[in-house]
């Protein structure tokens, strides 16, 4: 009886027949078990949430690629958006390869190589957004000069150079990794830091200029829906795309990164690579149009450059009329 009263005074209960302690006798272990269970379900919910975003982004980018390749009429805007959709799809696919390579044999591709492909395709998305925002910024700030001096196939040339240079740098980098050249590894890190910082600054400046010219100007003209979609895409990139570039830059400087921070950068990159198709669909549809429109009509409404052409054509005419006025 004395032992039983002592056990009871310590918050423990015993079975009257066997003398064994019941599970409620260990509140600390129960709390740890509940915490572990909560963490498990939280991670499961997070995984399912990210898997949903991943699948939706991959399907959305595939739809954009299909329509821009075979259905929608080609123009300089669609060339950039097509390459951006391909780059975003590559970001998602290479991330899936990198994660899968940690658990299974995926065609001999290592997890490290898959992650390098992931960061390279993410950099291509950054370069393409920089090119798109720079060109559209010039078309808004200097419309006459832009119309007179723009090369006919500028978008195709820029996209081809971005892909060629990125693939070349990736190939050279992996070649020197195989030869274990530490000096070239430092050079690549420096090049990555400079390009990331430079491109991010250009995107920020162009985003501010486009927002002021398109949304806040007192003398603004009616422009196409593409400018709204572009501003939203740039805003989402600054929120979700830049963190991975910053984390990679910090890793190049410190050679070590927290796993939580790295996971945050990867998740942000997945969201950034998945959101653009939904921006196009939401901006392209008519708000008061209740019936379902074909995707071809929605995408053509977003990527049509008729508004820009009308504006560019009106500006030279206005200039000529001003010069002819006595």
Image (cartoon, rainbow, N blue to C red):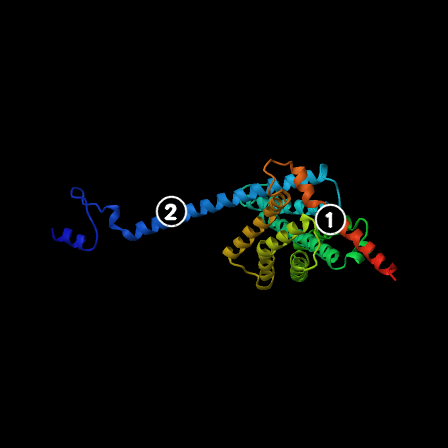
* x and y, in percent, of residue 326 in the image: 88, 62
In the rendered image, the residue lying farthest to the left is: 1
Q: Is residue 298 visible?
A: yes
Which residue matches tag 1?
307
Could you say which is closer to the camera, residue 235 or residue 240? 235
**Is 289 above or below relative to 233?**
above
Q: Residue at x 57, y 59 (%)?
A: 247
Viewer-nearest of labels 2 and 1? 1
Q: Residue at x 81, y 52 (%)?
A: 151
Which residue matches tag 2?
37
Q: How many marks?
A: 2
Could you say which is closer to the camera, residue 249 or residue 318? 318
Q: Residue at x 67, y 57 (%)?
A: 210
Q: Is residue 189 visible?
A: no
Crowd band around label 1 with a 10 angstrom C-alpha radius: few (<14), some (14–19), many (20+): some
Label 1: state its secondary structure.
helix
In the rendered image, the residue lying farthest to the front is: 326
Q: Is residue 320 left or right of residue 123?
A: right
* x and y, in percent, of residue 234 in the image: 63, 54
Q: Is residue 268 left or right of residue 304?
A: left
* x and y, in percent, of residue 223 in the image: 70, 51
**Is 302 above or below relative to 141?**
above
Look at the numbered discs 2 and 1 and tell me whether their residues touch, using CB distance below 8 Å: no
Image quadrant where residue 96 sits: top right
Could you say which is closer to the camera, residue 320 or residue 201? 320
**CA distance for labels 2 and 1:** 56 Å
Image quadrant where residue 323 sits: bottom right
Q: Is residue 36 left or right of residue 287?
A: left
* x and y, in percent, of residue 274 in the image: 59, 46
Earlier in the chain: of badge 2 and badge 1, it is: 2
């Amino acid at each position: 009886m004395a032992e039983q009263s002592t056990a009871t005074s310590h918050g423990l209960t015993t079975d009257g027949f066997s003398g064994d302690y019941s599970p409620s006798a260990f509140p600390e272990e129960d709390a740890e078990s509940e915490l572990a269970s909560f963490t498990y379900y939280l991670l499961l919910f997070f995984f399912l949430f990210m898997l949903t975003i991943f699948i939706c982004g991959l399907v959305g980018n595939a739809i954009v690629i299909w329509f821009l390749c075979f259905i929608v009429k080609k123009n300089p805007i669609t060339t950039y958006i097509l390459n951006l959709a391909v780059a975003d799809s590559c970001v998602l696919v290479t991330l899936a390869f990198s994660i899968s390579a940690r658990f299974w044999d995926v065609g001999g591709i290592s997890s490290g190589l898959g992650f390098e492909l992931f960061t390279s395709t993410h950099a291509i998305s950054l370069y393409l957004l920089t090119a798109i925002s720079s060109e559209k910024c010039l078309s808004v700030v200097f419309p006459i000069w832009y119309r007179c001096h723009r090369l006919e196939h500028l978008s195709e040339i820029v996209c081809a150079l971005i892909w060629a240079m990125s693939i070349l740098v990736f190939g050279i980098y992996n070649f020197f990794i195989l030869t274990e050249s530490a000096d070239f590894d430092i050079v690549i890190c420096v090049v990555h830091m400079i390009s990331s910082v430079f491109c991010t600054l250009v995107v920020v400046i162009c985003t501010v200029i486009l927002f002021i010219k398109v949304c806040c100007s007192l003398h603004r003209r009616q422009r196409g829906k593409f400018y709204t979609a572009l501003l939203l895409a740039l805003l989402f990139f600054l929120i979700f795309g830049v963190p991975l570039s910053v984390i990679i830059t910090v890793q190049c400087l410190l050679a070590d990164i927290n796993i939580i921070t790295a996971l945050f950068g990867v998740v942000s990159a997945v969201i950034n690579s998945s959101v653009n198709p939904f921006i196009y669909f939401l901006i392209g549809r008519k708000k008061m149009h209740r019936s379902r429109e074909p995707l071809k009509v929605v995408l053509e409404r977003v990527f049509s450059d008729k508004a820009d052409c009308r504006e560019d054509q009106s500006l030279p005419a206005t200039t000529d009329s001003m010069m002819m006025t006595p």
